[in-house]
Amino acid sequence: MKLKGIFIIVLTSFFLMAFAFPKNLEKRIDKEVKSTFEVSGYTFSEVKVDKATMLKLPAKISKDNFSKISAKGKVLGYVYVDKAPSKTAQFDYLVIFDNNLKIAKTKVLIYREEYGGEIGSKRWLKQFIGKSSKDNLNDIAAISGATISVRSMITAVNDILDTVGLLQQKNYFNEI
């Protein structure tokens, strides 16, 4: 009976990992979560938001793009994965929040344009670290030749910060 319980836990963990985010991004997300929180094992779980609140959020969240990250019964933080427009395509990015809902890491996962890929540089992305819903992003530096992508990334991060702020006001993160 004990073995059956362990099997169910392992299978549930695999299910949460396998179906929470797009398949082509799973390994990249896993790498970033592990390096950010310096853990080898963790689980994702859905942040359930009622439909009325969902309609008021600047960033659209779902079980497929916003999850709580836990390890050993403790909330480590949250991860958000989405796409943002560049000049002629879209790029995939992630934002990892710590358990105080401040940005711990941002990362451009896949950039599909010939120009503007500089927004994926660690140096530029570091500007977002420590930002929370109380901050504005007016101090984020521009990048010559990547104007559209820079504006898009800033808008996208600002939207998820505003969304997290609204959810925080409505006590969706009360376990923190």
Image: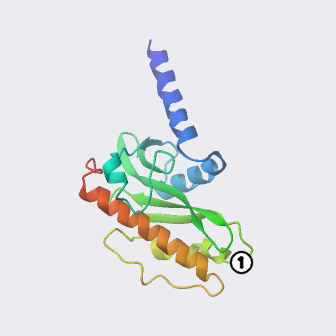
Q: x, y percentage for residue 93?
A: 57, 62
Report the residue that reaches farthest toward the right.
114
Q: Amino acid at mark 1?
A: Tyr
Any part of residue 137 in sight? yes
Q: Is 25 located above or below residue 150 in the figure? A: above
In the picture, measured across the screen, residue 53 lies left or right of residue 108, that is left
Determine which residue is flagged by label 1: 115
What residue is drawn where x is 49% and y is 30%?
12
Specify whether 56 is left or right of 44. Answer: left
Vertical side of 146 occupied by 168: above or below? above
Look at 51% across and 37% down and name the residue there: 16
Q: Residue at 37% of width from left, 52% of height from top?
A: 54
39 above or below 123? above
Say few, some or many: other residues with alpha carbon within 10 Å of mark 1 (under 14 / 14 to 19 / 20 or more).
Answer: some
Camera-nearest residue between 14 and 73: 14
Residue 113: image location, x then y, percent = 71, 71
